[in-house]
Image (cartoon, rainbow, N blue to C red):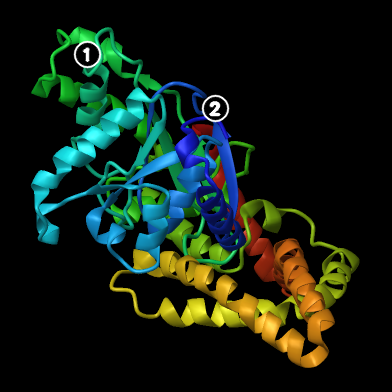
Amino acid sequence: MPGDPAKSGFIYRRIIWWGGLLVRTYHRLEIVGEVMPESTPVLAVQNHTNGLIDAHILMSTTPRPLRLLVKYTLISAPVIGWMLRQIDAVPVYRQKDGVDTRKNAQSFEAINQTLRDRSVIALFPEGESLNSIGLRKLRSGVARMGVNAELSVEGGIGVQIVPVGVTYEHRDRLRGLASAIVGPPIDVAPILAEHGNEPSRETVKAILERTSTEMRKLILHSESQEEYDTAVALERLLPRSGTPIGIRRQEAQTALRSDKASNAPERREAIRDLGQRFEAARLTGDDVLGPAPSAASTFVPMAITLPVLLFCLPFWVPISLLAVFISRFPKSPDKVATLRVLFGYLGLVLMIPVVIVVGALLGGWVGVGIGIAAYWLSCQVFVPALDVWLASTKKMGRRALEKDQDALNNLRASIGSIREAYSHER
């Protein structure tokens, strides 16, 4: 990997690979947009709604090693703290955590040195992970980091802020889509020059405003929970294009805001109701308006993947049960997926000695070899087989609509009416 050689070590690569395996098992991940700069000092910034998952998605946007900026309480936590220390994460000391905030001087110097080494600092400028209806107010730290690093060397070092926007189709659902859009880099030097190359409050404010503006272009940002829910539902009902889901949701919201008809409130309520029903069935408007899948395309893939999934169950069920059990204890709902992935780490590790012991009891060293090979194979085939199975269950749901043609025709009429009202506004 290009970048700081110190962050390209064995442990870093193993943690990124292992975390990526869990995240890509839990979510269908897509990375679109700009290419992260390859050799310039970068502050990679991302919206933060999904804890540990967000960090691994940010790491997936570039092959460059990232040095994460995290709150001190994570650095000192068991398990995850050890992993963060191995990848040389930079701690942030917050007053509300009851720690000495003067230690942030050391963290800022570490950040400056990392950027002077032309490496990447990754952070979440909203401050903490919360499920929200848009981008929250950014903390000033990201702007001050960029300014301090740029002014730390005469003539500047070319610091760039790269915005990343992540949208979860369904944050807590297995195999839900996680879409990350990498935005165009923001050069810190020109903004500094506009304000006399001084680390003033106006300079920091200008950088923050520019960063916030660019980040909002990448995700859905709503004024209320109702507006957010309606835009999400409408995106599911409108014709789907090849653009990322975050942009499609923005387009749906724009269409909703332009609807000034007298019956707009009733129509929005109908959209939310339909969208929730479709979301539960993993269906879209395109699925319902299109022809029903054939029995062969529905049940043949299920028959083929069922033996594969049964083969994987002995390995994945214990991991899943551990993750699901632990996820019942979070203090806030935005930690559910984080805990499932975090304890998935432990589950994957703990399965290895279990496989070795069971294999040895059943067949000695040969049994151990067969068990390890089977475990490795299950890691390779589980997700593709699960995707095929879920696609088939979605087709089953679509086929079930054919049983009541009157209800299906009414549903299609509703979708057609909604599309007629909003598609031209996109």
* Quadrant in which the N terminus is drawn: top right
Name the residue rendered at 52%, 62% in the picture.
Answer: 274
Q: Residue furthest bottom?
A: 361
Q: Is residue 152 above or below residue 84?
A: above
Residue type for callout 1:
Leu
Q: In the rendering, at what x and y percent does residue 96 appear?
A: 11, 58
Which residue is depicted at the point 42% across and 64% down?
A: 338
Find disc 1 in the rendering and name its residue.
192
Q: Looking at the picture, does residue 142 appear above or below residue 15? A: above
* Pick the front one: 62 or 225: 62
Query: Can you tell which quarter of the image residue 242 is in?
Result: top right
Badge 1: residue crowd in 10 Å (few <14, some 14–19, many ≥20):
many
The quadrant in which residue 372 appears is: bottom right
Q: Earlier in the sequence, mark 1 or mark 2?
A: 2
- Residue 260: tell me if it is visible: no
Nearer to the camera, 278 or 376? 376
Residue 418 appears left or right of 166:
right
Give neighbour class at mark 2: few <14, some 14-19, many 20+ (Cα, 10 Å).
Answer: some
Query: Pointer 2: what residue?
Result: 35
What's the residue type where badge 2 is placed? Val
